[in-house]
C-alpha cells in the first residue's frame, strides 16, 4: 500500500488544501492528513478543533484520514510506513522554503519522497492566514473554506469578541 503524509497546521483548512488532498488521493492508496503544531505560528483553533473540522470537510475522500502529531515529520512518516510527503505549492514564493524542507527531510529519511502538488489556479492566492485575517476583520470568507469550517470560524470569532 502506497501511503502519503500531507502535513500542515491547517488553521483552518481551505479549499486549496482540499484540492491538493484530492489530487494526492488519486495518486496514493492512502493519504494521512497530519495536523501539526508550529512554534512559529499562533493558531486560532486547537489541534483537536482542526482535526475535527478536517474530518468533517473531507468525509467524501474515502482513502484519506486525519491525525495529529508532535515531533519530527520524518519520524512520524516512518512510523506510518509512508513512502511520500505531500506538499502544496501555490507560487514561486513557496518554493524556496519547501525546497529547503524537502532536502532536510531527504537527509533524515532517504526513502521518503517529497511530492509537490499545485492546487487549481483558482486557489493559488489562498492560504489559512488570509482566511483568518478576513474572519477576524469581519470580511467575507465564504467560498474559501468548507461550510463546516465557515461555521466554526464564525463561532470562534464570536467567542473571541465576548
Image: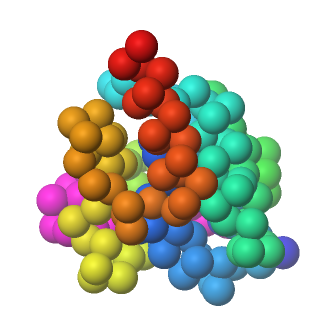
Return the x and y of residue 51 as percentages of the image width and height. 67, 42
Residue at image coords 32%, 49%:
131
Q: Is residue 91 above or below residue 153?
A: below
Residue closer to the observer: 61 or 113: 61
- The answer to which quarter of the image holds residue 127 is bottom left
Return the x and y of residue 31 as percentages of the image width and height. 69, 66
**Is 86 contained in the magenta span?**
yes
Residue 46 placement, left or right of 55: left
Return the x and y of residue 19 as percentages of the image width and height. 48, 75
- The answer to which quarter of the image holds residue 73 is top right
Residue 36 placement, left or right of 158: right
Residue 50 placement, left or right of 31: left
- Asked if residue 139 shows in the view, the reply is yes
Q: Is residue 52 above or below residue 102?
A: above
Q: Residue furthest top?
A: 162
Q: Residue furthest bottom?
A: 26
Q: Residue furthest left?
A: 93
Residue at image coords 72%, 74%:
61
Residue closer to the observer: 114 or 30: 30
Residue closer to the observer: 114 or 18: 18
Residue at image coords 45%, 67%:
15
Residue closer to the observer: 53 or 111: 53
User: Which range is magenta?
Assistant: 83-97
- Asked if residue 103 shows in the view, the reply is no
Residue at image coords 35%, 27%:
41
- The answer to which quarter of the image holds residue 63 is bottom right
Amino acid at each position: 500500500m502506497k501511503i502519503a503524509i500531507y502535513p500542515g497546521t491547517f488553521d483552518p483548512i481551505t479549499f486549496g488544501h482540499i484540492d491538493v488532498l484530492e489530487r494526492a488521493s488519486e495518486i496514493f492508496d492512502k493519504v494521512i492528513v497530519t495536523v501539526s503544531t508550529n512554534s512559529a505560528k499562533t493558531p486560532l483553533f486547537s489541534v483537536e478543533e482542526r482535526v475535527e473540522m478536517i474530518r468533517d470537510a473531507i468525509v467524501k475522500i474515502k482513502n484519506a484520514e486525519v491525525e495529529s502529531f508532535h515531533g519530527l515529520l520524518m519520524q512520524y512518516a516512518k512510523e506510518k510506513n509512508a513512502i511520500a510527503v505531500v506538499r502544496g505549492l501555490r507560487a514561486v514564493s513557496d518554493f524556496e522554503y519547501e525546497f529547503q524542507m524537502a532536502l532536510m527531510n531527504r537527509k533524515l529519511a532517504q526513502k521518503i519522497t517529497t511530492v509537490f502538488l499545485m492546487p487549481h489556479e483558482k486557489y493559488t492566492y489562498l492560504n489559512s492566514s488570509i482566511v483568518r485575517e478576513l474572519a477576524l476583520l469581519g470580511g467575507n470568507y465564504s467560498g474559501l473554506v468548507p461550510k463546516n469550517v465557515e461555521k466554526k470560524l464564525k463561532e470562534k470569532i464570536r467567542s473571541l469578541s465576548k
